[in-house]
Structure formats: C-alpha cells, structure tokens
Amino acid sequence: MNYSYKGTGDGDNPQTVKSSNGNFTPPVCWYTSMTPKQMKDEILRRYNQAGKDNAGTVYNFYNDQNNQMDEDHYHEGKDGSWWVLTWDETQLDNFNATCPYDQGYFWRPPADPPAGQITPEMLADAAYGHLKLPTKGVDLSPAPENQKVNLPTYVKFQRANAQVSVTAQLTEPNGQVIAATVTAVPNSLTVDAGTQYATPQKCEYGLGNAPSLDSANAGCNITYTRASAGTYPFTADMTWNVTWNPSTVPTTDGTPLAPGLSEFQQDVTVEEIQAVNR
C-alpha cells in the first residue's frame, strides 16, 4: 500500500491528527483479492522466502499448502477469488495495533465477499490516521514573556487558509486502483489562559474562509487579573473540518469525517504594569 502526502499547511512541528472521536483508530489490516495464478505465486514466494530465512517450520508449511492447493489447481477456472489478509505496513511497529481478522487466506465465490474487503471508506480512515497538522500556534500581543495584568491579550493567526491533505492509494493484485483523499482545513481556534486568574479563561474564534485572524476587534479576549509567580500554560487548540473523496485529488466538499484537533502550548509570564513618574 502506498501513501502519499499532498498539499500545504503542515507548518512548524506537525503532529498526527487527534480525532474529536476519541475512539477512532485507523484500520490496520484488510483482505485483498487474488486470482488463482496470483495466489500460487504468493504461496511460492512465501515458500521461497522461508527457505532463504532458514525457517524450516514455515518452509514445510508452505510446501504442504502448495501441494494441497495445487491438487485443485488453486481453483483455476472457477468463479470466485482468493482473499489474502494484508497489513498496513506502517502499523507493523505499533504494538497496540490489532487486526480483527485471523484467517490468513481463503477462497470465496463471487457472491460471498468477506468482511474486511478493502474499500475506499477504509482507505479514507487509513489516510485520516496519517494526517499531520501544524502546531505552530498563534502570535500573542503583548509577547508571551511580557503579558500585563488587566490588559487584553490579542491573538493573531496567519495560516487560517491552510489546507492539509493525505492520499491513500492501493493497487489490487487484479490491477484495480482504489484511492481516497482526506482533506483538512482550519475551522475554529480555542485559546485557554491556563489559569483561573483570567477573564474570561477561554475564548473561541471562528475562522471561516478568512486568510488570517486578529482578535483585536473580537468580542472575546483573555485578560489576566493576577501576575504569575512563574508562568501560565497558555494553550491554542485548532479544530479542523475534515472531508474525504474517493480519488487522488484534494477537495473540501467531500464526505465529512470526524473533525480533527491540533494542540499547541506555550508559557506566558504576566507582570504588573509599572507606572513611571516624570
């Protein structure tokens, strides 16, 4: 399976998307179809590889499998397909990834495809799991190290028109190409002062189609009410609208998926305003 990254907007310090659906996990395995000849080639490939690896038990197993299946010529000339369990290779090092299917391969008639057959929807979920969103965050005024008590904190965001996309594309052994492209665009920004000594503690800004955000004229701006003995953890979390379409072309008018989240945190230091007498 081949994943390709397209588009702009990954920005500084990109992080894998966090879904608003906390239960989301990308698919780790599925079934792909093979013709009788392709299945025989696959069994012989595994047999020969086991021989190269000096894996005697595996070598003997695939030798027996080939002899048994060759008696029926791998169902050559019959209606149906072989189905082979296939893993997303990018998940192989993920020890928390589990495959819900336990049968390595089997023959099925055409009217009885298996559960777990690869579909564009499954590829869309796989691509979603590979989205990387920017976490550069926002620019603050006053600067993070120079916040002032009882003065509003203005927020600027210069990448409100950013777009990120990932295409998952798979060519089946029969030559069929299956693809899905997932596209994410920023939708809203939520900032949190990181302390109860702020009014309000949180503000949310809708981004819409604006190329940038400047909260100077917004109805909500955080104002710190107490100086910090050290620092406060100011956070800026972006919500992204995510859609998908069954092609290799990014578009924002596809089928909706769960919104994506990206998180950014920076320390701010709040000081009392110093009066100067002349």
Image (cartoon, rainbow, N blue to C red):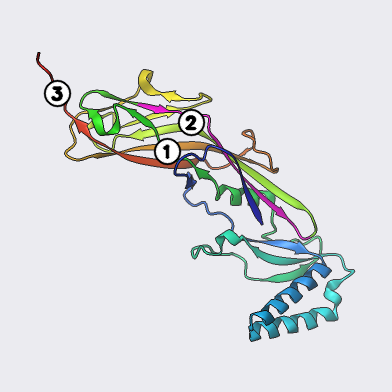
Report crowding for label 1: few under 14, some 14 to 19, many 20 or more residues within 10 A (C-alpha).
Answer: some
What residue sits right under mark 3 in the picture?
274
Q: Is residue 89 above or below residue 17?
A: below
| Residue 99 drawn at (x, y percent) | 58, 64
What residue sits right under mark 1 in the picture?
136
- Most extreme residue toward the front is 278
Range drawn in magenta: 155-173
Residue at 69% x, 62% y: name it: 31
Amino acid marked by disc 2? Arg
Quarter of the image for residue 170 reads bottom right
Amino acid marked by disc 1? Lys
| Residue 50 drawn at (x, y percent) | 67, 79
- Regarding residue 114, the answer to whether it shows in the image is no
* Distance (Cα) linking label 2 and label 1: 10 Å
Report crowding for label 2: few under 14, some 14 to 19, many 20 or more residues within 10 A (C-alpha).
Answer: some
Q: Earlier in the sequence, mark 2 or mark 1?
A: 1
Quarter of the image for residue 72 reads bottom right
Amino acid marked by disc 3? Gln
- Secondary structure of the residue carrying tag 3 is loop
Q: Is residue 242 above or below residue 74?
A: above
Q: Is residue 217 above or below residue 144?
A: above
